Image: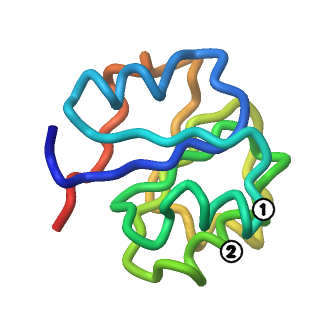
Amino acid sequence: MSDAIAVVAGTDDHGIADAIDAEGIDVTSVDVANRPALEDAGIVDASAYVLTEVEQATSISVAKDLNPALKVVVYADGSLPDFARGQADLMLDPELFEPADVPVPPAD
């Protein structure tokens, strides 16, 4: 395993957490991405935050507040609200990209 940590938030219908784990990155998953859940998941030490539900887009601001260096990957159907687009580093549609093709940044 590497020193990289990723937090996956939301339902994981496409298996993104397993794909990230297969790359040797430690993964913690949360269903509801509120501040306490993100803190418990280790977001402060994470290198990446992967959001799988655009309905939880407000969690991006919370995650970035807890870890400003965090890379945010949105792997979800639908459009990310305007307020969250500027904080996402990468937005991918699961209909177009397989989980194994999603680049998750390693630890710095």
Residue that appears at 46% across and 52% down: 90
- SS at mark 1 in the image: loop
Residue 45 sits above or below residue 32 on the image? below
Q: Which amino acid type corresponds to the residue marked 1 in the rendered image?
A: Asn
In the figure, is residue 50 to the left or right of 33? left
Disc 1 packing (10 Å; few <14; some 14–19; many ≥20): some
Q: Which amino acid type corresponds to the residue marked 2 in the rendered image?
A: Val
Q: Of tags 1 and 2, which is closer to the observer?
A: 1
In the figure, is residue 100 to the left or right of 68? left
In the rendered image, the quadrant that contains the C terminus is bottom left
Pointers 1 and 2 in contact (CB under 8 A)?
yes
Residue 60 placement (x, y as % from top left): 65, 65
Residue under pointer 1 = 34
Residue 14 placement (x, y as % from top left): 58, 16
Residue under pointer 2 = 62
Residue that appears at 57% across and 22% down: 94
Q: Splitting the image into 4 quarters, where does residue 18 fall?
A: top left
Residue 29 placement (x, y as % from top left): 58, 39
Q: Nearer the viewer, residue 95 or 108?
A: 108
Disc sitting over residue 94 in the figure: none
In the figure, is residue 90 to the left or right of 107? right
Residue 27 placement (x, y as % from top left): 41, 39
- SS at mark 2 in the image: helix
